[in-house]
Image (cartoon, rainbow, N blue to C red):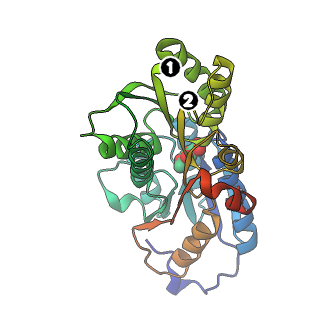
Amino acid sequence: HTLAPSSEAYPPARPLVLGFSQLGSESDWREANTTSIKEAAEEAGIELLFENAEQSQEKQFEAIRSFIDKRVDVIAIAPVVHSGWDEILTEAKQAGIPVIITDRSIDISDPSLYVTHIGADLYEEGVKAGKYLLDKMRDQEAPIGIVELRGTEGSSPSIQRGKGFQDTIKGYDEYRMLDSETADFTMEKGKQVMKTFLRKHGSEIRVLFAHNDDMALGAIEAIEEYGLRPGKDIVIISVDGTRKAFEKLVLGKINCVVECNPLLGPNIMQAVQELAAGRTLPKRIVSSESVFTEQMAEKEVGNRKY
Ligand code: GYE
């Protein structure tokens, strides 16, 4: 897709208009992502139409249709779930509006329905979590019971982090997945679901893999209320790398945080401008990320930007 650069002066005389469909505001990661997008748009002089879908794909469809009606220059979508995007993206394509997919990935039969996907390698994050676990528990006695707090059902971070983790530990017989439930990426549900895990499995639980920090923070409360020590009696691994999770890492209540960078605003605005200038973008733009353990936490906690 291009925005007909030859028939229009570049930079264009009017500001570019970006319609952004944000999936929700379920976590600290998401808040940081939204702030980054708003600030970067402002900085780049891009007019931003921003809609929050509160975790509803239906609401995302409505937002995207309103962007099409307003004939925005570019549409960007942080998609709540993995599937079901063919029809709405076809509508955008027919209207001649290029679509950027950001953060979560989508499962689509025709890849020409979007120009690029900007975001982290979510499968790799699950692999990193699994590798940390193998390392950490190397000399521990079997069986090692694991519980998993999954993200939003049908969302790509939940599917891919879960799969990356499973693929990494499979073949090691000492590990046993005791339970795996969705807690929708929120702190409140993380606490609630962890409570039921503890009620069902008690001290058999040696490891918690939480698909994001907010759920891990909720689970920590549940574990303490149950009378166990998070990070000691139960090893905790989570994903994102928010400041609040880092504070728990410093205290040894979380053992490992796999970083997922929400600060995608500048990348997205750059992509919008390049599309407007008629350039072709790479189909995939991956952000680079680290893994942090308790030992590294003290040094890093002051540097966290989200
Ligand atoms: O990990 C979680 C958020 O899609 C990668 O969504 C994102 C995830 C992030 O709610 O905290």
The three-letter code of the residue at mark 2 reads Asp
- Residue at horizontal 47 percent and vertical 29 percent from the top: 206
Residue indicated by mark 1:
203
Report the side of 146 relative to 35 (left or right): left
Q: Earlier in the sequence, mark 2 or mark 1?
A: 1
Above or below residue 111? Residue 222 is above
Q: Quarter holding the N terminus?
A: bottom left
Q: Is residue 31 visible?
A: yes
Residue of label 2: 233
Secondary structure under tag 2 reads loop
Left or right, 35 with reference to 266 = right
Q: CA distance from mark 2 to mark 1?
A: 8 Å
Q: Residue at x 58, y 38 (%)?
A: 59
Q: Quadrant of residue 24?
A: top right
Q: Residue at x 72, y 47 (%)?
A: 247
Q: Residues within 10 Å of mark 1 (few under 14, many from 20)?
A: few
Residues marked 2 and 1 touching at CB (< 8 Å): yes
Looking at the image, residue 48 lies above or below residue 177: below
Q: Is mark 2 within 8 Å of ligand 1?
A: no
Residue 3, image x and y in percent?
51, 75
Figure check: 293 above or below 270: above
Q: Quadrant of residue 268?
A: bottom right
Q: Residues within 10 Å of mark 2 (few under 14, many from 20)?
A: some
Can you give x and y, in whole percent of width and height, for residue 100 in the image? Answer: 50, 61
- Decide which of 222, 180 is in the foreground and name it: 222
Disc 1 marks which amino acid? Ser
Give the SS element for disc 1: helix
